[in-house]
Image: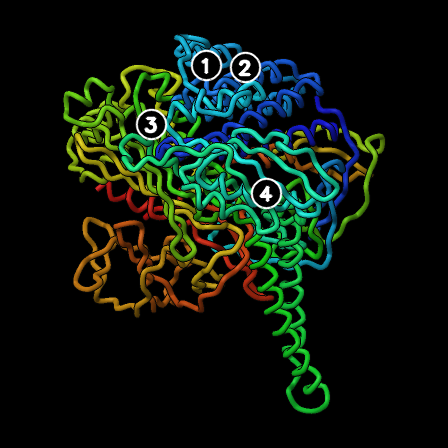
Amino acid sequence: MGENIDSLLSELAELNENIYNSARDLKSAIEVNGNSVNITGELFRAFHTIKGLGGMSGFSSLSQFSHEVENLLDRIRKAEHPCTFKVVNLLILSTEIIDRFADSIRTIGTDAVEETVLNSFRRKLAEEMNATPVGNGKDSTQLDFLPPGLVRQLNDMELARLKENVRKNHPIYFLDVSFPFESFDTGLRKIQDGINRDGEIIATLPGEEAATDTHISFCLLLASPQPPEDIRELAPDTSVLTMIHEPFPQPDHKTTAPAPAPAPAPAQSSGDRTVKVQLKELDLLLQDMEEMAMVKNQIEATLAPLSSAGEIGHVAQQARFQLNVLEQRIASFQKRVIHYRMVPLASIFRRLESSTIRTAAELGKNIQLIFDDGNARVDKQITDALVEPLIHLLRNAVDHGIENPITRIKRGKPENGRIELTAYQQGSSVFIEIADDGEGMNTATLLKKALGSGLAEKKKKYSDNEILDFIFQPGFSTSKKITDISGRGVGMDVVQTELNKLGGTIRIQTTMGKGSHFYIQIPVTQAILPVFFISSGDTVLGIPSLFVKSIQPYEAGRCVYVQDQLYYRLNEEPFRAIHLPRLLGVDDLETDLRVVVQIRHFDQLFAFLVEDVIEEKEVTITPLKGKLSQLPLFSAICNFSAQSVGYILDVPQLISLLRGSHEQT
Amino acid sequence: MNKLEPILLLKSGQSLFGIELRYVREIVSDFPVFPLPAKLPHISHLALLRGTPYAVLNSEYFLQIEHKAMGRLVILIAQMAIFADEAVQSIPPEQLSRHENESELETSFVKQVVQYRNRIIPILDIQAILNDQPDFKFISI
């Protein structure tokens, strides 16, 4: 791929992210009746830039698309079109189209996006534009309270902004401010910043008096809820402020529109003191550090036979001390690199939101989508891999969960279905929850489907949780119709598989008529994990600490067999148990179980019976790939000592096996 | 019939076998090798080379070559490795001839059997090994 294309794609990705962030800011501004003029300005400029980039690079379709969205934003800027939630949704949908343009440019070198996708968006855009035709109705906005001649000096945009503020009853000021030459820029900025906090500078015009050798003056037309004395306070001491027009005092606040809320603060620019580093470069750094840790282990093993007495012993002791320091440095370096890989979950919200809004529009459902601030930080690799499973869950919530508006009203629910995504970090895990207030799932229907598809057996009794687990079986679908969105039964099993690959797990809770709640637990990173090491025969195994609830001494008398299934009693309650050495085929008559590791998987508990727990430590892990991925029940390895590697147990897979075997009883 | 390709001739105990040269990445003599946590028929060990784990193939499973001790060399092939005691030499195809009773020694993981200076050499079928998906029936809870 050419360097120019790389640079274009990088710029496009950044602009698209900015568009999404601005769209969210716009949504917040609309919610609080805030000032959205700066935000629409930013959005307009972003689309204008994309239009230019597309045009310069020969991608006319991208350029044309941006131009169309830019037209809508231009009308909003000129107050010829209302800024509504529908506009926000259109902007979010447009980021998905820009992604598609970028994908096409990246993969086939042209900006070819499917016509059906573009046409669908264009239809929605046209509907929005036609909802408020330009020039409809007579403009009766009265501006004669302003100094004569002022209105003629304003351009179209400024005039539109002025009328919009007057229509909204925002107090209008017209000031003349004279600044000393040497400080006019900082002085002007101080006033602009003060006004923009809760109002808007509509126009900046030349001052009433011609510039002298020492001073320059500007006229400012602005809308602000602040009283005149506060406006005067904004001017620096070195300047002279003359109020040419100020709003009449309005003691009756009922006639005045509520003060517009401040516009959301624009995202802080990181400036130019940053460099972008490819993720694979960080992976290489980690790999180098891992190798250094192994070399350190080998040096330690080489030093081990040296006796502690005599000159050589003293040197060996010194070397061991230095190796300890080296070990700490390596660990600290690894943690730092891992930290660089962490990104806020919010970085994928754009893709989730646009896809969900599009699904709702396609299905004619009204939704209120609520995402939290997305501050939980997760390894970039995991964040990227989470996009598809989360999109699937959100689309399912729209398709299967949220009822159509008429049904909702009949059921006494708000017309807009609510879908909420929250994420929070706890230790080395991130928990993501997706909840909807739709119709929930009917376990009787699910069981009927499972019986029909041969997944369940007629004579067996299933708990609600076991029935809900059928959803994750390949080929399971309750949808009567096959659509692009659902009904093919190739979704939830893939969601679970993908989450398991990331070391994560998923559980469902549902209440008929009230909605469903999906709980996801994933590690914040797969590169470094706190792990409990246990010995098993000649090998060392690792259990990720996030699954470990407690560690207790093993007592043979607490083992119970029920229908050939092993249970272990903890606090007099039997838990499904695994004899780990036996499972791995490494047990013999000498195998001596000494420890019980209690495993927590959401609300369920299991017991792993093991020989010994060695220690808990944080380790850098390497996923098993190629032929080694055929090693069942293990997901990764880590460096343990010069003599052994640690094999990381795939706990979700083990639990899935346990639950599967339980269902067979 | 498959076209003959240059091979790397390897010796394991008293047995000889070949690997098509295009699959050979590296021959390593000083390497850490670790036992596996579970018994698998087709993978005998895990080799860790510069931080990257490789599955060491069980030559008994793939070639019916009994090899009790660990080899002195690890030959890296594609994403896997195999033990050998000696990397004898590389042999161009023109010095190889097809063995007449090829089927005698063929298994599903032997691509061809060739003759070189009166010695019979099975050539490992790397693609077949890569595609092999054994069914692990030993796991039961």
Give the spatial CA distance, label 4 vs label 1. Answer: 37 Å
Residue located beneath label 4 in the image = A189
Q: Quadrant of residue B30?
A: bottom right
Pick out the residue farthest to the bottom. A310
> Given the image, what chain letter belongs to the residue carrying mark 2?
A
Residue located beneath label 1 in the image = A125
Give the spatial CA distance, label 2 vs label 1. Answer: 8 Å
> Given the image, what chain letter belongs to the residue carrying mark 4?
A
Residue drawn at 70 percent across, 21 percent down: B1
Give the spatial CA distance, label 1 vs label 3. Answer: 26 Å
A153 vs A435, left or right, is right
Same chain for the residues under marks 3 and 4 in the image:
yes
Residue A600: % across, % down: 31, 54
Question: Which numbered circle lies on residue A68?
Answer: 2
Location of residue A547 with respect to A360 vertically, above or below = below
Location of residue A327 with respect to A96 vertically, above or below = below
Q: Amino acid at mark 3?
A: Asn
Give the crowd class for mark 1: few <14, some 14-19, many >=20 residues within 10 Å. many
Give the crowd class for mark 3: few <14, some 14-19, many >=20 residues within 10 Å. some
Q: Quadrant of residue A311?
A: bottom right
Location of residue A653 with respect to A26 vertically, above or below = below
Q: Amino acid at mark 4?
A: Arg
Residue B134: % across, % down: 49, 38
Quadrant in which the C terminus of chain A appears: top left
> Given the image, what chain letter belongs to the residue carrying mark 3?
A
Q: Amino acid at mark 1?
A: Leu
